[in-house]
Amino acid sequence: MTVGETAAASTLADLIRARVRDIPDYPQPGVVFKDITPLLADGAALTAVVDALAADHGALDKVAGIEARGFILAASVACQLGSGFVPVRKQGRLPGPTFSQSYQLEYGSATIEVHQDAFSPGERVLIVDDVLATGGTAEATAELVRRAGAEVAGICVILELEFLGGRARLPGGNVRSLLVV
């Protein structure tokens, strides 16, 4: 990294740090929820985050956003890149035939789905979400992309909770976090 790139990354990290708030004991006791709504409400901060998430991936066919906060970010990234957007939804929320993948959360388990025709074989797909915690959701999404025959070009998040070890579940996953805490 050049001095300018390091300064820009530091400034972006500071911007994110200042606009993501901790909500203790949500959605259950012992969990500290990372609330990105103050960041989303700040137009300049949101623009800086979307720009950073969209940077340096090469040609992409689709951007997959993980429900629900990932939708906001991924749709914006897809528009900026001129790529298609694919929603990765909680089980039972998509109307057509789907692929499903179950996974473990920090505080339970869940299943996500994607339409079977969302990706074409050989397409390059960027996965975008707000937070990388245990890595279960990102790992499950990557599996859905691969099951459809597409290639995971990378995984981008605003915030990575390093102490939960989620990156270890994504070997070779080309993971980029704008801020690691």
Image: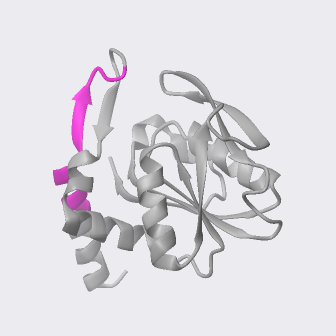
Q: Residue furthest front?
A: 95
Query: In the image, is 172 to the left or to the right of 70?
Result: right
Residue 55, visible in the rendered structure: no
- The residue sitting at 60% across, 47% down in the picture is 88
Say above or below: 66 vs 108: below
Q: Is residue 19 magenta?
A: yes
Residue 172 seen in the current view: yes
Against 33, is 145 above or below? below
**Residue beneath the point at 79% across and 50% down:** 116
Residue at 65% x, 52% y: name it. Answer: 171
Q: How is the structure coloured here?
A: one colour
Q: Position of residue 82 (x, y in %)?
A: 54, 79
Range drawn in magenta? 13-27
Quarter of the image for residue 21 reads top left
Vertical placement of residue 52 versus 29, above or below: below
Q: Nearer the viewer, residue 75 or 180?
A: 75
Tell me the residue at 46%/39% (across/down).
Answer: 133
Q: Is residue 165 left or right of residue 25?
A: right
Q: Nearer the viewer, residue 19 or 115?
A: 115
Looking at the picture, tell me which residue is in the foreground, 147 or 175.
Answer: 147
Count how many numbered circles sit on residues in the image.
0
Magenta stretch: includes residue 172: no
Q: Position of residue 25 (x, y in %)?
A: 29, 20
Q: Position of residue 109 (x, y in %)?
A: 59, 23
Left or right of 135 on screen, residue 18: left
Residue 44 rendering spot, x and y as whole percentages: 20, 69
Quadrant in the picture for the N terminus: bottom left
